[in-house]
Amino acid sequence: MSSDLQWLLLRNSNAFLVKRIPEGPILSKEPGNLTNLHSFKYSGLANEKTIVVTETESGIQLVTRKKGAAPTAVRPACATTTIRPRSGPRRAAGVTSKIAKRGYRPDLRAAALARVSALVASKKEKKAAPPKKVRGKKAKTA
């Protein structure tokens, strides 16, 4: 089944739609959707080539479908790239640009980088706030 036909069947009703605000954007919780916007470009169900970003114990995984893999295969051939937890944002930029340079959905590079950067930032341990210095009259009396 073609991607366009799948999108026509899925766009109005599927289990992943989130319509919270009547006049606002329609969101989607489907796997493989990098921006969580309900559109054909970012759809993980309708497109054959998707970039799936997941968070695991070993780090952040980017999964892409290998070239020539049949979408109806029992176990689709996928290429997995793992970014270790303390790698930093430059590693994420390199991995996403490598995927785009191979010609695998270069239009999703910015969205994939944003998703990976957000996951790296959420895993980062926050520094303890330094104690506040007393200033003004309180500093003179102390």
Image: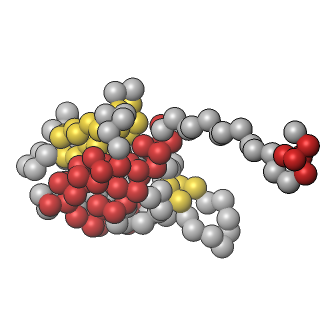
Residue 141 vs residue 36, the one in the foreground? 141
Placement of 68 over or under 38, stated as above or below: above
Q: Nearer the viewer, residue 5 or 133?
A: 133
In the displayed structure image, the side of residue 77 where residue 113 appears, left or right = right
* Residue at 63 percent of width and 70 percent of height: 24
Q: How many circles with numbers are drawn on the protein?
A: 0
Q: Quadrant of the C terminus?
A: top right
For image coordinates 34% across by 63% down, the residue present is: 110
Q: Residue furthest left?
A: 68
Is there any visible trace of residue 51 in the rendered image?
Answer: no
Which residue is drawn at the image coordinates 30% and 51% (left, top)? 90
> Is residue 133 at least partly visible in the picture?
yes
* Left or right: where 55 falls relative to 28: left
Q: Would residue 82 be found to the left or right of residue 121 on screen?
A: left
What residue is drawn where x is 12% and y is 58%? 102
In the image, residue 55 sits, relative to residue 121, either above or below, namely above
How was the colour assigned to the protein in this rendering?
secondary structure
In which quarter of the view is residue 47 placed?
bottom left
Which residue appears farthest toward the bottom when viewing the image?
Answer: 23
Q: Residue furthest front?
A: 140
Q: Nearer the viewer, residue 108 or 7?
A: 108
Question: In which quadrant is the N terminus drawn?
Answer: bottom left
Q: Position of residue 26 (x, y in %)?
A: 55, 64
Q: Is residue 101 above or below residue 77?
A: below
- Residue 140 locus on image (x, y percent): 87, 47
Name the residue nearer the viewer: 37 or 120: 120
The single residue placed furthest to the top in the displayed view is 57
Q: Return the x and y of residue 3 as percentages of the image width and height.
A: 27, 62
